[in-house]
């Protein structure tokens, strides 16, 4: 009986080996050395700025990852590919075919929004007419350029969209490979709607996600989730072509980057790094040969599970920076009552917190934050 089990197991292993060989992926992991995560002291000392946040639409939204707040309306794109218009706290309109997963959302002009969908690509949305159209579909050829995914973006002159493609090698459904191979193959691209033209701006990024055009009008910020840092790149001006780190060795993994209502920058933290116990994912980043073996031997589904287990979320965390990358303060919920943030939307009186996993939108009054942190914005 036991013998039979081993024969079956052996056969499965051999067949799997043949399957992997047949796939013939040329895994080329490279070395990346994470620094020891910062401890939760100083500006990162625990505070209750976000504790007890109001929970909106519990159970009615699935992963509202990106938000736009205008007056009494919240626009969101969700993890199940829907675009919701929420008026006075009630869902008034649901647009979209419900495929894909929206990671980025901004208003383009008076009538339209743009959504960045990790599976589908860049989309043009009209909430009032209920239409969703393709702008830059995943896989479509633009003079030799194609994209595998679209994560987040910003807009110039209601016409030019600059966006992140998190991996140019793997589609998001293969995120096990994405994170274990861990290579610098994310990009920033520019799409001109009027000219229907796609252009490469910057290559070699480490799972770029959140994106913001810097208020200086010359540079942009891009979160490199896979390297726990935010990179600044200059598109014009005296520093044109220069790349520098805006913030490094973050206390977690960053998601969307947005302006606050008081001249600063909010970075939503998707996950928090444990200062006492560096994750195996980070440790293994220093050993590309080990990861190469894992990639060749372990089925992708297990690499996915492993990756998810490695990304810890022990508290709610938002980082606030000045325009030069100095950390001003952190907004936290150390109880973990609200966490897993993907987006901070500031309408001047409240912060609205989007999430890539929660089934609600969290809302916190700025007054409460000022009181908790003893600051005045
Ligand atoms: C907004 O932009 C879209 C896409 O370019 C365009 O079709 C639409 O007409 C524009 N709306 C306005 C009011 O300019
Ligand atoms: C940021 O840096 C610029 C250029 O070095 C400087 O002029 C500006 O005052 C700085 N701003 C802040 C908020 O530190």
Image: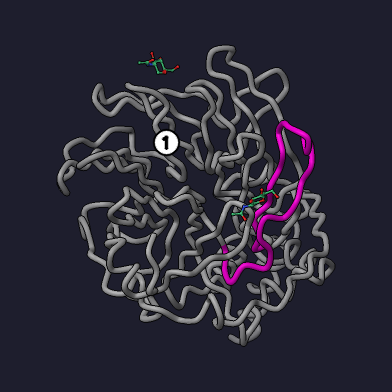
Q: Which one is in front, 295 or 3?
A: 295
Rendering coords of residue 201 (x, y %): 71, 33
Q: Which residues are magenta?
A: 228-253
Residue 240 drawn in magenta: yes
Query: Is disc 1 placed on a helix, strand or loop?
Result: strand
Q: Quadrant of residue 40?
A: bottom right
Quadrant field for ligand 1: top left
For the residue with label 1, is its CB less than 8 Å from the closest atom of ligand 1? no
The residue drawn where x is 31% and y is 61% is 366
Rendering coords of residue 173 (x, y %): 55, 49
Examine the rendered structure and indicate whether residue 282 appears above or below residue 96.
below
Residue underneath mark 1: 106
Quadrant containing the N terminus is bottom right
Quadrant containing the C terminus is bottom left
Q: Which one is in front, 316 or 373?
A: 373
Residue 28 drawn in magenta: no
The residue drawn where x is 72% and y is 48% is 205
Rendering coords of residue 193 (x, y %): 53, 18
In the image, 216: left or right of 355? right
Rendering coords of residue 146 (x, y %): 66, 29
Q: Quadrant of residue 105?
A: top left
């Amino acid at each position: 009986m036991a013998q039979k089990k081993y024969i079956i197991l052996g056969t499965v292993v051999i067949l799997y080996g043949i399957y992997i060989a047949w796939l013939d992926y040329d895994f080329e992991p490279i070395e990346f050395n994470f620094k020891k995560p910062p401890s939760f002291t100083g500006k990162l000392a625990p505070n209750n700025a976000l504790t007890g946040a109001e929970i909106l639409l519990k159970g009615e939204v699935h992963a509202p990852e990106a938000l736009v707040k205008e007056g009494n309306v919240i626009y969101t794109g969700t993890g199940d590919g829907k675009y919701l218009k929420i008026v006075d706290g009630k869902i008034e309109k649901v647009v979209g075919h419900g495929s894909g997963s929206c990671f980025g959302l901004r208003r383009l002009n008076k009538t339209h929004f743009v959504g960045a969908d990790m599976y589908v690509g860049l989309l043009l949305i009209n909430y009032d007419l209920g239409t969703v159209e393709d702008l830059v579909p995943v896989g479509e050829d633009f003079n030799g350029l194609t994209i595998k995914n679209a994560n987040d973006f910003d807009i110039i002159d209601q016409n030019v969209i600059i966006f992140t493609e998190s991996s140019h090698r793997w589609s998001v459904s293969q995120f096990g490979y994405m994170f274990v191979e861990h290579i610098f193959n994310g990009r920033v691209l520019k799409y001109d709607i009027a000219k229907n033209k796609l252009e490469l701006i910057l290559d070699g990024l480490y799972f770029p996600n959140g994106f913001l055009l810097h208020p200086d009008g010359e540079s942009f910020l891009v979160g490199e989730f896979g390297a726990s840092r935010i990179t600044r790149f200059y598109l014009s001006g005296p520093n044109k072509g220069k790349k520098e780190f805006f913030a490094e060795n973050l206390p977690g993994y960053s998601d969307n980057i947005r302006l606050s209502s008081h001249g600063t920058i909010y970075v939503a933290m998707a996950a928090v790094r444990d200062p006492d116990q560096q994750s195996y994912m980070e440790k293994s980043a220093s050993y590309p040969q080990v990861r190469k073996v894992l990639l060749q031997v372990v089925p992708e589904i297990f690499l996915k599970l492993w990756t998810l287990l490695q990304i810890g979320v022990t508290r709610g965390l938002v980082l606030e920076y000045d325009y030069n990358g100095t950390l001003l303060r952190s907004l936290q919920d150390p109880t973990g009552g609200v966490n897993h943030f993907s987006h901070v939307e500031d309408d001047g009186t409240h912060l609205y917190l989007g999430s890539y996993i929660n089934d609600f939108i969290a809302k916190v009054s700025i007054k409460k934050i000022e009181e908790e942190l003893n600051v005045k914005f």
